[in-house]
Amino acid sequence: MTPLEVVILVSGLASLSADLGGADSPVRVRAVSSLAESHGEAVTRTLAGLARFDPDPAVRAEAILGLEAGGKSLVLPVLEKALFDPEPPVREAAIEALTGIGGPEAALALAVALHDEDPGVREQAVYALAEVGGETGWSMLRLALADEQESVRRAAGELLDERSGSASAR
């Protein structure tokens, strides 16, 4: 892509983002979903901006889900901040995106969600850590064994038992 094409794309994305400001929530969510199907740094930056600053939690969550395909160095800081969003569905979207990215950096970020105020978010983080795996993911998952919520403790225990069972079967 030439520099001129990049400038045109970026200005078009900025215009689209501004135009969506007045649309109702379902329309904006569909537009963000469509935008996420595109690729490139300009799209990732636009989605990152929507994920951080859009007033609608549904739009923020959809933008976060679209970030999974972006570059790790640009996306990880946005997803880490999204884990502190006031709305649980946005935090859940960040967990889902981090799961898709994987790796030790994602596991460390997911460990933050184990301390979320919402037990549903904490439980989702447990399953995400098991899916991400790796030494970091499994060691962070052990923290959930001390959770105040029984369903979170049970999920962590079952996943750790499954892992040790499959490890001993090898």
Image (tube, rainbow, N blue to C red):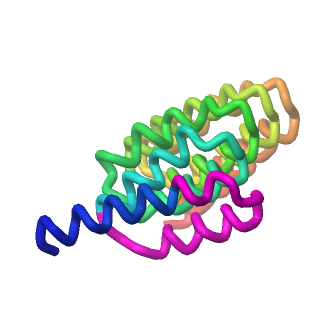
Residue for point 46% across, 36% down: 108
Say which of 103 and 57 sits in front: 57
What secondary structure prevails in the magenta region? helix
Residue interval drawn in magenta: 18-40
Q: How many marks?
A: 0
Say which of 21 and 30 sits in front: 21
Residue furthest left in the image: 2
72 left or right of 46 in image: left
66 left or right of 30 in image: left
User: How far across and down, in percent of the image, does residue 57 sit?
Assistant: 71, 45
107 left or right of 32 in image: left
Residue furthest right in the image: 150
User: How far across and down, in percent of the image, does residue 26 sit?
Assistant: 76, 64
Residue for point 31% across, 67% down: 9
Residue for point 64% across, 47% down: 160
Magenta run includes residue 24: yes
Say which of 111 and 170 sits in front: 111
Q: Quadrant of the N terminus?
A: bottom left
Res. 82 image quadrant: top right
| 108 shown above or below 166 | above
| 119 shown above or below 117 | below
Question: In this rendering, does residue 3 appear at all?
Answer: yes
User: How far across and down, in percent of the image, does residue 163 sit?
Assistant: 59, 55
Residue for point 62% across, 48% down: 60
Magenta run includes residue 145: no
User: How far across and down, in percent of the image, does residue 136 sit?
Assistant: 43, 40
Res. 40 image quadrant: bottom left
Question: In this rendering, does residue 163 appear at all?
Answer: no
Say which of 93 and 100 sits in front: 93
